[in-house]
């Protein structure tokens, strides 16, 4: 472990810090399971929908210095809570953030089906979670007022998605501040 701690001090990410969002996402899954079980008919725990998400990039309206190429990979689960399309989801993974560093993240949220156009099922959703911003968490706190605990910052998301078959196309926004008027992220999820 000494080597990992030295690497962490040198600007890298320790294994423990990289693993933390995965453990948090696992905890969110464990917490979500009883909540889902209580929201559906007794004994009818729905089988979770699993998915792999690929993050492509973001647009930072009002700031041209931030990195808009934000590749990432996530794993998630979704549980249907009501026949009307209210779902609970939990997702964790890693992405290359707007400040050019690798950031693990974990999210939990809800989404609601809002309609169909042809084969596409449209949903809106809201989520909350955390991401790890090692080098810039203090700067984000000073510049934009984003709190952090040991480099972990809170996330709040709003998502519009269109699912066609097993593919889900997602536009996600997070709160903007300072010289950034809006942040929109594009990702695709493959459900299995």
Image: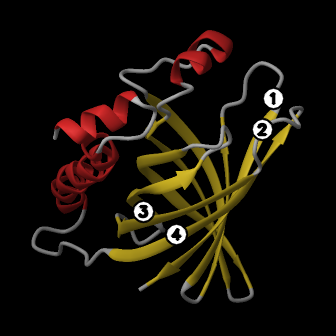
Q: CA distance from mark 3 to mark 2?
A: 33 Å
Q: Residue at x 83, y 30 (%)?
A: 181
* Mark 3 residue crowding within 10 angstroms, few (<14) / some (14–19) / many (20+): some
Instruction: Give the quarter of the image for residue 114.
Output: bottom right
Tags 4 and 1 in contact by the CB under 8 Å rule?
no
* Mark 4 residue crowding within 10 angstroms, few (<14) / some (14–19) / many (20+): many
> What residue sits right under mark 4 in the picture?
53
> What residue sits right under mark 2 in the picture?
66
Q: CA distance from mark 3 to mark 1?
A: 31 Å
Mark 3 vs mark 2: in front? 2
> What residue sits right under mark 3 in the picture?
87
* Mark 1 residue crowding within 10 angstroms, few (<14) / some (14–19) / many (20+): some
Indicate the secondary structure of the residue bearing disc 2: loop
Q: Residue at x 61, y 10 (%)?
A: 142
Whichever of labels 1 and 2 marks the residue nearer the N terminus, that label is: 2
Indicate the secondary structure of the residue bearing disc 1: loop
Q: CA distance from mark 2 to mark 4?
A: 22 Å
């Amino acid at each position: 472990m000494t080597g990992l701690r030295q690497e962490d001090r040198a600007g890298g990410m320790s294994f423990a810090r990289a693993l933390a969002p995965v453990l948090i996402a696992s905890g969110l899954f464990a917490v979500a399971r009883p909540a889902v079980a209580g929201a559906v008919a007794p004994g009818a725990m729905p089988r979770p929908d699993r998915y792999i998400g690929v993050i492509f990039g973001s647009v930072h309206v009002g700031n041209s210095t931030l990195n808009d190429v934000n590749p990432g990979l996530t794993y998630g689960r979704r549980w249907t809570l009501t026949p009307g399309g209210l779902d609970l989801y939990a997702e964790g993974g890693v992405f290359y953030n707007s400040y050019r560093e690798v950031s693990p993240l974990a999210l939990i949220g809800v989404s609601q089906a809002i309609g169909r156009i042809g084969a596409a099922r449209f949903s809106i959703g809201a989520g909350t979670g955390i991401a790890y911003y090692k080098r810039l968490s203090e700067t984000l706190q000073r510049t934009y007022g984003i709190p952090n605990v040991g480099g972990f910052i809170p996330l709040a998301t709003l998502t519009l998605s269109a699912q066609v078959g097993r593919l889900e196309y997602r536009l996600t926004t997070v709160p903007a501040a300072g010289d950034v008027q809006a942040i929109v992220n594009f990702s695709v999820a493959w459900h299995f």
